[in-house]
Image (cartoon, helix red, strand yellow):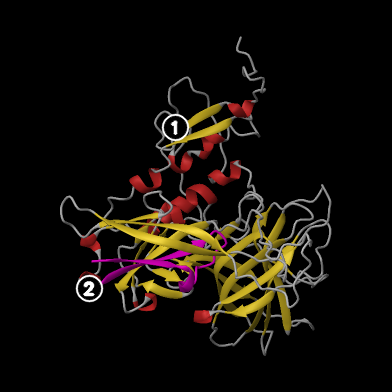
Amino acid sequence: MISTHLRSGAAKTLQDIHVGVDVWGRGSHGGGGFGSYRAIEHIDPASLGLSVALFGPGWTWETIQDKKDFSWGMWWEAERRLWVGPTEKVTVPPMTKRHEEEPDCLHGLFRPFCDFFATLPPPDPVLLPFCTSFSPGVGFAWFVNGTVVMPRTDHGWTDIDKQGALGNMLWPKPHLRWEDREGTTEPVPDASSTLYFDDAWLGGNSLQVVFNVKGSDAEDAFFRCVWLPIQSLSVTPLVEYTAHVIFKIVPTADPPVDIDIGLSIKCPGPKLDPSAISVAEDLTGGWTRQTLTFALPENPRVTPVTAGLVVGFATEDPSKEVQFSILLGQLAVYPAPPPPSPHLSLASPRILWADFQRRVEDHSRSGVLTWEVAASFPPISLPSTAPAVDSPTPLWSVDSSDHAFPSYAYFNIYAGAALGGPTRATFIGTTGLDGRANRFYVDWEVLPDAVKRLKDLRFFVQGVTDRGEVTEWGQSAFVDTF
């Protein structure tokens, strides 16, 4: 008999037993591939309550990569079907017996892998700030603050380090509901979400949401609002959080649509503080940032909250069908910083210094770029009257909380002439590929010709924080190399 207890005393459960499923179908019940769900139906909590160990999930790539018409989009479609479900019927392999004595086993229609596993929110932003630019870790261009710094290429790029959440309430299918239209019997507008690689706020893509609205003769149809949930989150009651979303409204053709968007945090339990109203800020490239601060009241039964958008739209003739779309560039939720105070200095992230070590063994101009980060505080402001000698209040009080020292998600690297400045430098890459935080290998052979021709070459290091903020050039660093 096998004991159900570990030596440490922790009890085992059925979920501690992992049953292997080969996506290639070699000896697996169901035939593998899009038939893998048949094996999982015998394993999941509705059946035995065991865990699943998938082998060979690269099946979607490896079975089509050598096809003549292969493209990344073709693989992405197959990958999406296997994991999160199709938009059309999926063809599954026939159910065959592995031996003559095997009994008949009937299964229903195709089910994606996500059907068998619970969707859980990310860690509490108090423990780990939540920030996503909706990237699948691939792209064809590179954007920084809405500006393209690396033009589109046909072959594109791949970097797993840049992967982010696609919005577990938004992708692959948004689930809209009417906002403040109780009692209406009108169907909720249909919506779809797709990766959009031609425009972005940060990284290589944004997430496009297309709304299809049927015509209406209702009295209140001149202006209608829908709730667009994006991401579920777990938050701690009584803790203040800051949330921001960056989006762009795509201009519509005929008929024109007036669109109004606001960021909102919703929870099924107690109402949020009514002061939690988003504030809009216009950004470059037609992008807009909405920011709000919120906190949940003390209630241990509160379920995870949802961050999303309230989208209002109006047309001259609401009886006509309309279509409009928005691009989502970023969503971030993190602990709210302390309010500004003359008695408390808040830190700003900065890159302290940068260094470049050339590879001297082969007289190459290639080398390693390194740097260090720091937190900077504004200079002390002396009071107009000198405090008492025995006053216990310090003249300079600095924020020493956990969020005071900056944490960077990655860094953008540029190269240019020393006299040209960073705004005229050429983007040459980002960190993340080699898994090291403050390090970038400069390969001279792959640098643009315009950079190679420079005699007084200067490298600029620009940080992107874990809250999605790009370090200003005045808080960045550079190093010269000759």
Q: Amino acid at mark 2?
A: Leu
Q: Does residue 142 appear to the left or right of 6 in the view shown?
A: left
Q: Which mark is residue 454?
A: 2
Q: Position of residue 319 (x, y in %)?
A: 69, 84
Does residue 390 sit above or below 208 in this rendering? above
Whichever of labels 2 and 1 marks the residue nearer the N terminus, that label is: 1
For the point 45% across and 51% down, the residue is: 79
Q: Secondary structure at mark 1?
A: loop
Frontmost residue, 436 versus 393: 393
Q: Position of residue 305 (x, y in %)?
A: 72, 56
Residue that badge 1 annotates: 96
- Which residue is farthest top? 1
Frontmost residue, 262 versus 82: 262
Q: Does residue 241 appear to the left or right of 362 in the view shown?
A: right
Frontmost residue, 277 versus 420: 420
For the point 64% across and 33% down, the residue is: 45
Query: Does the image show residue 190?
Result: yes
Magenta region: 454-482
**Callout 2: few (<14), some (14-19), or many (20+) C-alpha neighbours within 10 Å?**
some
